[in-house]
Image: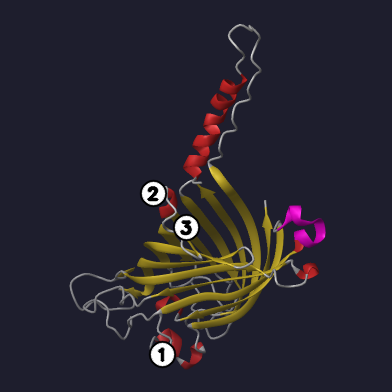
Amino acid sequence: MSVKSFATTLLSLPAMFAATAAPAADLPVKAPAVAPAAEMPFFFVNDNRLTYAYEVTAAEPGLANKTAKQTYAFTHFDVWAYGTNLANLMLTKSDRADPASPCPVLQPSGCAGATEFFGLIRSTFGFNQIFDTKAFTVGPLRNVSFEVGAEGQTKNEFLAPSKRALVAGLQFAFDLPYKGFIDIAPLVYKEWNHNAFLTSAFVAPVAPGIPDGNLEFRPTWAVEVNYYMDLGFLPENLQDFAISGRAGWYGARGTGTTTAQVPLAVQPPTAVELNSEPIRLTFDASKAIWGAKYSHFADVWVAYRFWQNKYGLDHNVAPACTAPATNRSCTESSLYSGITVKF
């Protein structure tokens, strides 16, 4: 039964009960009162969580050394009649190996670590719900949805990035064993950003107009994958563990500027970017301590992160990635862990 037809049935129940409870016309007795039907909630799921995480050996393009990062995050997820909404807001603090502005990246001594803000929104609109059908549920395929989203990022480092991005496409939602799922979303991706090196202070204009550091990349393709599965095959006393992960591939999106203003040697073409957390092992601490009623109220987890061609910079070509002093800093491979609390 669809959400729409289920709600219609609930609303019709008082009339049905009133009709069956009415007495005969020659018996003037008062009919029993009928309680009103419970109103359907607008959000079937409304989930809010806070996370603290520590990454051991993060990398940033141009850095001579790896940097440790602390992240504070707020995540909201909800489900309503026609789809889902996800919002993730993160504040990340680097150690001194990743210096804040105005310190240059290769001379970080004595400088405070940089602070970064990143925000992401994704919304889906399910075809099964929109068209009141089950046509998009076939075998393990649970639904097909239209997906839209946006991203924003800024950091108080010398480059002064100011990322804004939009995505739109489809999401294919599949079921996995043990109450699991995997979502695969082919998308169109469009990004705007900023680079302090691409200003008149560093690049002499070779055509009318002065470079101002603003970048506008051409639209490209993207594929985002998310999965989650409880480890239900483990013995009962070990079923407090789950695995999850994500991966995002983002196609090459040009240089973000014209070669007439900025030579390719300064701003080489971008490459396919892979930003992933292939696996996260989560321990449901609240369930283990207080029982199933408190499942996932407090999760402790450890994960592995792999980020190739970070920010689209080609790790084989871009000077920030290939210079000997940068230590191949456009590839991030790191363990990190954290705790997530539901409220």
| Disc ID at residue 121 | 3
Give the number of the mark in front: 2 or 1. Answer: 2
Residue closest to the eye, 30 or 305: 30
Q: In the image, is residue 294 part of the stretch drawn in magenta? A: yes
Residue underneath mark 2: 131
**Image coords of residue 245 (percent x, y):** 57, 71
Q: Which residues are magenta?
A: 286-295
Quick one: SS at disc 2?
Answer: loop
In primary-sequence order, the first of circles 3 and 2 is 3
Residue 60 in the image, given as x and y percentages of width and height: 51, 79
**For residue 106: magenta?**
no
Disc 2 residue crowd, few under 14, some 14–19, many 20+, Cα 10 Å: few
- Height in image: 106 above or below 298? below
Figure quadrant of residue 111: bottom right
- Residue count near mark 3 (Cα–Cα under 10 Å), binned few <14, some 14–19, many ≥20: some
Distance from the alpha carbon under mark 3 to that under mark 1: 31 Å
Circle 1 is placed at which residue position?
316
